[in-house]
Each structure stands twice: as structure tokens, then as C-alpha cells.
Image (tube, rainbow, N blue to C red):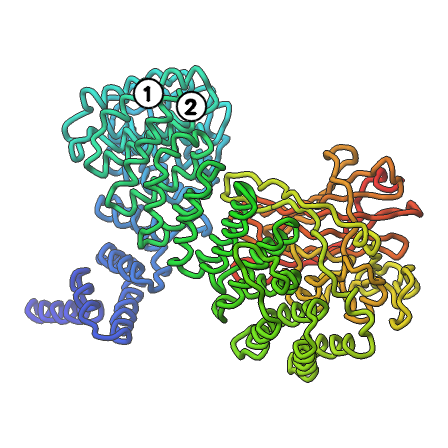
Amino acid sequence: MDTVSGIRQVFNDAVERVKSPTPIRLRDLIRQIRAARTAAEERQVVNKECALIRSTFRDEDSVWRCRNVAKLLYIHMLGYPAHFGQLECMKLVASPRFTDKRIGYLGAMMLLDERQDVHLLLTNSLKNDLNSSTQFVVGLALCALGTIASPEMARDLAGEIERLIKSSNAYIRKKAALCAFRIITKVPDLMEIFLPATRQLLNEKNHGVLIGGVILITRMCEISHDTLHHFKKLVPNLVRILKNLIMAGYSPEHDVSGVSDPFLQVKILRLLRLLGRNDDDASEAMNDMLAQVATNTETSKNVGNAILYETVLSIMDIKSESGLRVLAVNILGRFLLNTDKNIRYVALNTLLKTVQADINAVQRHRGTIVECLKDPDVTIQKRSMELCFALLNGNNIRSIMKEMIAFIETSDSEFQAVCSSKCVIAAEKYAPNVRWHIETLLQVLRAAGNNVRDDVVASTIQLLTEVVHQHGYVVGEMWEAFRWATAQHQPLLQVTAWGVGEYGDMLLTGQATDGQSKVQEDDIVSQYEQILIGSQMSIITKEFALMSLMKLSSRLTDASALKKIQHLVNGFGCHLNVELQQRGVEFSQLFTRHDALRPALLERMPPMEARTSGSALTNGTGPAPVSTAAAAPAAATAVAQTHSSALLDLLGGMDSPSDNMGALPAAAPAAPTTNSNMDLLDLLGDIGGGGGGGGAAAAPAAVPSLAPLQLGGLAGSGAPLAATDSLFGGVMAAPAPVSAPAPPGEIPGVTVFERGPLRIDMALRRPAESPALCVITVTAANTSADTVTDFLFQAAVPKTLQLQMLPASGSVIEPSQAVTLTINVNNPSKVALRMRLRISYSQHGQPVTEQCEANSFPPAAWQ
């Protein structure tokens, strides 16, 4: 019977082994997964193993739980779902065996987080292990708590951590300090219980405890301003520790490439930077030590460069001496000569942040910075470009601008667009003379080709209208560029077409300077013909050229040339593009039915309104100054009218605009009389900016469909506004000149829009000489870290008010910068002021359109 019983027991054990086969080891699973030749084979291996692990988990007394959880963690690292092992991790944490606890805590840190309530089940196990007599078990619990602690768990166990920081075991004190870092981050209110124990950590001799204490104090200072003042008295202790590290070294085992304990040095420098900011006494106490670190640190290794970088940041952030700041900038200059691209990028980035602190010291390294423009790394190119613009002033504008134009010629299209805009702003701000300014803008247009933003074209045209005494030179330069420019230089073609159209008669009479001989009328018309019939020319370029050719028709005298112009214009009467077709039909009428209007309608355009550049050269610089432009002549002032834009019922339930027909000056007999009001539907449609809409560009080129018409001499011709409005479908009249905005504060300003990257504020004032007038200065600020492009601001008011909007200072808003525009609201009835606003812009290539109503203006704006 004993033999039979023994055989039966052996048989039963064999059956159990068949039912519960021994799981493979982790290394065997890794080998199988790596042997898979396709993703499908890998998934098959993983799914099979997960099924076996699930079946094993069902056995409550499984002896293979530790091995299975280890395999499950590897599967989780590969990206496969492993959440079903969370409870098994809890069981391993509760196990008395250290190997089980180690895998259990590792699994808990990987599979659990504070968003899952199941992690709260760990609280009791953590508390038990924190009181364990084995330091390694306590260390496991501290690591887990420092990784997944939630606010609730932090409050429950903060007392245990505070006790362990005072432990006699250095291993436990180090981990407890790092765990306290996590706790005060989650629950800043618990900071007070750690303050007494934290100060003692700086007196430690153990490297791990000391660096943990410095990290904990740094976090406390970042969270609480009061705690920052509390630890300022520790500056001498930190300086002493840093001095010992430099002079004597901490211990040989912490030496890295000949630098004594670089990690501790970096942490202490960061803490000193916090303690010395805006504090004269603390800064004075650490100045000498920072100078020693900057001069005694080894620079041949990366660890030394890391320490020097933190030293530079500390010097520039505290109230350091001027000589020390120069030393810091020189260190960054040496970084620029390093062959490592990362070090050069860090140097450029830091110089860009500190250039405002000591620009003269940075100027000494201008040559090296300019050389970085030729680096093949685009990130270094970008930072170098921004730094070059930050260093621009009246003394170096010629040399730096020459380098920037050369950079535009060889850079990518993205850099060409940004750099060309910044070059225009820099030239406007620091140009030594008018001719250099004009030549520079033309060089920028040549170098950037078609990768030019609208603001460059607009700024160039604005400048050309302002330089009244240089028009002879201007048209000579325009004609030369107009002749050789191709389809790859269409922005340049647009500018030159505008210039030749306005001042082309000087080419015919020989008034163009610099040895320009007379140009034949047929040659000019032939040049326009090549553009108008060119298949590669854009619609906007053809619009410019067509309008410019019409302007020339009032200046040319040769009958054959005029006939050829009329033939070209008539050909656009059946163009596929509706805008060009409309222009062709309407311009044809100027040669026939309205020929009497053509000379007056197409006179030269007067100087445009002076504008304020709202963009900045870099994120840290201020806006460019207002350009000095001549005042508009009397003819333009007489024609300029204040447009009244009524709000439509569908856009806010205000008064209907149907009965609000503004009075107009007497029109010519041949022209029908229409109103000059631009309602909000026209304002927000394809026509572009109207009387109630403020286009963002400083010159008319910002609105493609209307640009060529606005470039004409309509505003300065003296022709009745009714005729121009009827003929061209609502051309925007030139704005009447207004006085400059008074300093804010006379009437409380309001924030009317704050959404996405934009915040729009309005500052209001009422001039004493015009009680019914309210002058509103609109400031659109970019509060994001990315550039906003194609900015367009439009507004409309009820029919009882009259609104006039001047062009905005720009259409591109750099981060932390703003553009401005002026709105004049005439309110003779003294009714409550309200507006309907429409804001459109692009960011990251995505167009955005927003609408809102502004009705919270203070009563002082109208009473």
C-alpha cells in the first residue's frame, strides 16, 4: 500500500506541474522577444506570456509572483498594457522578503500614479517600511514615496519623513531629504515642519546628504518668498562650502575629470543665485567667490564648462560688480569659440538673455557672433541672428546690416522672412541717411526674393512717400530694379512698380539722378507688359502693376504708348480673377466715359501718415521710434472723410445701418453719388479694411485685394470721394490727420479682448478742443512664446457714432511685443460708447478669427 500511495503522490505532483508550469525567466523572455523578426511575432510572444502571467496571478499562493511581475514590468517598458499587475505589486510590497519588496516597489513606481486611487493602498505598507530596522527597506519606501506621493499621501507621511531627516544614518537622511522635496512640491503648506531639520543638512560631511539638503533648500526658496529671506543668512555657509570644493576638494571619490564634485558645485551656485537676487548684502558676500570659481575652473572638460555656465548665470542674476559681469561675458565669448555645437548654442542663448545687462561687454564679441551666422546648425543660426539684431546701434548698423543681408541670401526661407522684417525695423531705427535706408531696403528685397512678409513691402512704400526730396533718386533705383527683377522677386516687383507708377514722369524728363538718362515711354510700357502677361506672376503683383500702369497713363504723353496701355487694361476685362477683371472693367471706363476724371484721380499719392513700429528687433528690445513723415497736403486733408461703420443686427442686435447715410462732398457731374459708409459686412469681407476696419499693416499692401488701389493717388487727387467710392467699390479714403495720443491715465483704460496669444487694451482720451471726439489707442500684445502673423483688427460702431481708424503699426507681433493703432470716434450725441470687434491672426500657420463686443468703457469716454 505504501508503494501505491507513493506512486499516486508522484502522479499527483506531475499533474500539478502540468497544470502550473514553471514560468520562464526574464532573460529567456527578453531573448524570445528580441528573436522576433516582425512586430506581429513580437505581439504574439508578448500576448502569450501575458496570458500565462494572468493565469498564474489567479493562484493566490503563487511562488512565481516576483518573477512574473519583473517580466510584466519589461513588457510595460515595451509599451504593452500591464495595468492588471497593479494589485500583484501591492502583494509584493507587503511581503516580508526584501527581493519581493524591491520588485513590488519598482512595479508600484512604474504602474501607479496619483491619478489612480489604488495607489492609496500603499500608504500603510509605506508607513510600516519607513519604520523598518533595515535601512535598505526604508530606502525603498522613501524612493517610492518620492516618486508617486499624492497630496493625501504626503500629508499622512510627512511626519515620518521629518523624523527620518534627523536619522543618524546618512543613507536614510539623503533619501529622506529628496522625499521631502516631493512632499513640499505637492503640499507647500507642509514646508514649515521641515525647516528646523533642513538647516542642519548644510553642516553635513556626507556628500549625498549635503547635495540633497541644497536641493531641498533651493525648492523651498522657489516656493516661498518668506523662506527665501529665512535662508539668506546661510549665504556665508554656502560660500565656505564652495570655497572648500575649489581649493581643497570634497573627496577623491567625487572627482570628475579633475573637477571636484561638479554636481554639488552646480547645485550650490543655483541656490546662491536665488539668495543673491535683488539683495546687495548677499551679492557682496558671494562676489569674490564667484570670481574665484570663474577663474580657477578647468575649461578643457564639459564638467568645467557646466560650472562656468552656472557661474555666469549667477553673476548676471545677482547685483554683481561691473568687472565681474565683464568676466562673465568673456566666458561666454570663449564658449562661442568651442567646437561643441551645444556649448556654442548655450553661449548664444545666454548672451541673448544678458545683452541688456551689459551690452558694451557683449559688443566686444560681435565678430564671433557674426561668424556663428555661417554655422550649418539652424538653431545656432537663429540665436546668432537674434543676438546680432540685439547688438544693433547707430555705430555698427552698416557693418551688421551688410552681414545680415549676406545671411539672408544664403539662409532658408523661414529665416529670410523673419530676418528681412527685422532688417526693415533696424534700418528704420538706425539709418544714417535716407539714401542708405532706401538702398538697404532694396537689397533686403533682392536677397529675400519671394520670402518677404507684407510688412517689408509696406514699410518700403511708406519710406518712398516720405522722402519727398529724393524722389528723383528713388525712381532711378526703382527703374533699374524693375528691369532685372523676375518672378522670384515679386515683392521687389511690387515695390518698384509702385515707385515707377508714382514718379515715372521723372524718368521721361531726365530728373532721375545718378546719371540716369531719359527712358522711352515704349520701353516702360513694354516692361509692364511682360509682368502683366507673365504666367508666373502672382495676382497681387499683377494688381500692383495694373494700378501702376494706370498711374503712368496720366503722366505719359506719347499716343502710341497710351493706346498700348488702354489695350492692356481692356484685356483684363475678361480675366478669370474677379478682382483683376473688376479693375480691368473700371479702369477701361477711365479711358472712355470718365476720361475727365483720370488725371485728377491718378495724381501722386501724398506722404502717408507717420507710423509707430510695433515690432521689436529681439524679444528684449523696445519698439522702434516713430518715423518722421511729412504732413499730408491740404488736398488730401480736404478729401479725407471720417467713415461711419454701423453694426449689423446679425452681429449684435444694434441699430440697423440702412438709414445711416453719411453726407458726402459734391461729386463730379459724371459720377454717381454714393455713401462713404462701410458696413461691417463689407468691412469683414474680401474688400479688406474700410472706414471701420483697421488693417494691421502700416502700408496698404497688407490687404492683397485692395493693395494696388490704395497705392494710387486717390487720397491726394482732390477728386470727390463719392466718385472714387462708386468707381472702385468702396476704396478706403485717406485718414484725416489726428493729434498724437496723450499719455494714458486721463480716462481709465480697458482690456477688451484676452484670448489665446493676444491681449488687446484700449487707452482713451478726449481732446479739450474737440469735446465730441474720443481718441482710442489700441494696443495688441502677444502674451505667448510664439510669433503672431497676419494680424488684422477691425471695428464697427452704432449708426449714431462716427468711426475713423488709422493703419496699425504692423501685422507681425513678436513674443512679448505689441502693435498699436489709433481709433477716432466722433460722438456728437454723447451716447454710451460700444463697439463690435473682429480680430484675425495666424499662429503656427493656422488662421484664427475672433469676434467680441466692447461695451465696458468708462462714462468719461462720452459724457
**Residue positioned 66% across, 61% down in the render:** 502
Q: Is residue 790 left or right of residue 37?
A: right
10 Å neighbourhood of mark 1: few (<14), some, or many (≥20)?
many
The amino acid marked with disc number 2 is: Leu
**Residue positioned 32% across, 37% down in the render:** 142
Q: Quadrant of residue 643?
A: bottom right
Of residues 299 and 46, the one nearer the viewer is 299
Q: Is residue 389 left or right of residue 694?
A: left
Q: Position of residue 713 (x, y in %)?
A: 73, 61
Of residues 512 and 833, the one nearer the viewer is 512
Q: Pick out the residue farthest to the bottom.
A: 574
The amino acid marked with disc number 1 is: Leu
- Residue 72 vs 112, above or below: the answer is below
* Callout 2 touching callout 1 (CB < 8 Å): yes
Q: Position of residue 316 (x, y in %)?
A: 40, 28
Q: Name the residue tied to disc 1.
A: 238
Q: Name the residue tied to disc 2.
A: 275
- Residue 712 vs 418, above or below: the answer is below
Q: Quadrant of residue 29?
A: bottom left
**Residue positioned 44% across, 61% down in the render:** 413
| Quadrant including the C terminus | top right
Cα gap from disc 2 to disc 1, whole angstroms: 10 Å
Q: Secondary structure at mark 2?
A: helix
